[in-house]
Amino acid sequence: MGFSEPVRRSALADANESRDWRIYADLAQRLITQARKLYAKEDLGLDLSNTVYALDSTTIDLCLSVFPWAHFRTTKAAVKMHTLLDLRGNIPSFIHVSDGKLADVHALDLLILEPGSIYVMDRGYVDFSRLHAMHQAGAFFVTRAKSNMKAHRLYSASTDRSTGIMCDQTIALDRVSGRQLPLTKRGLDGHYTRAHYPAHLRRIRFRDAETGKTLIFLTNNFELPALTVAALYKNRWQVELFFKWIKQHLRIKRFYGTSENAVKTQIWIAVSVYVLIAVVKKQLGLEASLHTLMQVISVTIFEKMPIRTALSSEMSQCNTATKNNQLKLFGF
């Protein structure tokens, strides 16, 4: 780029702390809008017309003495990245960066629910008052039941146990008598659950043939086949892969700057890079994985050549190097 000397780490830290992180958040949102349009017709392999989202969060550990504003525990600091991932293309449609103390379930209060969409979540998001609000908004959810949930069966549909579906039931939550719970905890377990979710629920018990584990799913969608509900929850793993990709390949474990603004700036830049590569991949019809594209672009970013040329050039170099190493190994 013509720099006369290396860029100092302190210079990058000063830039991250002085420029408002919302600039990069807005850039990421523009790219996300573009990417979601490109992947809108992506096939999930589930014969669904609904938009399907996976909701989860990841914790990024920080040093308490260096990041005292990121409250998490007595001796630790952290930030959480709450993410709603559109499974058509694995594009993040919503991201909220908080300190580590914000419980996952509170992320449901920040979402703008889309009627007809399906939200797939783990057990950390089971709060029946919030799930009922989602139901009333016309959205569907798929989650796992907690072990202490109190409910009774109203109806059982016929199932083929050879597929792994052990039962497919319509249930109603029980109103369990017991000690008075604080308002902040009501609806989180068996107590007073019927008051918080008065409608019926669907409970599906599924046995995974690969692991031998039995999973119990809850949903308010009574139309989808039971196997499709199980497959939807399995696809929730894509949000975990997204977190892994972001952390490993975009290096947000180390930050340039220690302020909240600097941390959020670097996270949103990482998200922008991820989405930008996804846009390039779709627009050019590239078959390479996002990881391969990231590696190629990182070493050719200042080369004036088409991306297709850079990709084919790098791949051919990798193949040649592999063959040479094999020949040297066997002494030819």
Image (cartoon, helix red, strand yellow):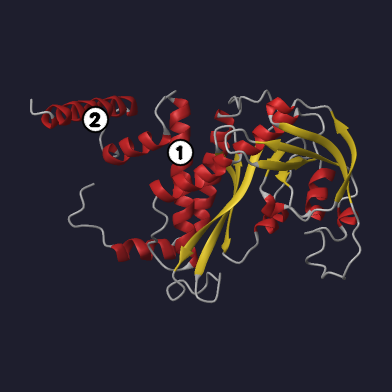
The quarter of the displayed image where residue 92 is located: top right
Asked if residue 215 shows in the view, the reply is yes
* Label 2, label 1: how far apart the Cα atoms are: 24 Å
The quarter of the displayed image where residue 215 is located: top right
Q: Who is closer to the viewer here, 45 or 41?
A: 45
The amino acid sitting under disc 2 is Cys
Q: Which residue is mark 1?
A: 276
Percent across and percent down for residue 45 are 61, 24
Q: Is residue 104 left or right of residue 196?
A: left
- The crowd level at tag 2 (other Cα within 10 Å; few <14, some 14-19, many 20+) is few
- The crowd level at tag 1 (other Cα within 10 Å; few <14, some 14-19, many 20+) is some
Please tell me which residue is depicted at 48% across the width and 40% down the height of the picture. 275
Placement of 197 over or under 233, stated as above or below: below
The amino acid sitting under disc 1 is Leu
Q: Which mark is residue 72?
A: none
Percent across and percent down for residue 64 are 47, 73
Q: Earlier in the sequence, mark 2 or mark 1?
A: 1
The label nearer to you, 2 versus 1, is: 2
Please tell me which residue is depicted at 79% across the width and 46% down the height of the picture. 134
Q: Who is closer to the viewer here, 5 or 120?
A: 120
Q: Who is closer to the viewer here, 96 or 172?
A: 172
Callout 2–callout 1 Cβ contact below 8 Å = no
Percent across and percent down for residue 14 are 37, 66
Q: Which mark is residue 318?
A: 2
Quadrant where the C terminus is found in the figure: top left
SS of the residue at dot 2?
A: helix
SS of the residue at dot 1?
A: helix
Please tell me which residue is depicted at 50% across the width and 42% down the height of the picture. 241
Percent across and percent down for residue 113 are 74, 44
Asked if residue 20 shows in the view, the reply is no
Placement of 45 over or under 188, stated as above or below: above
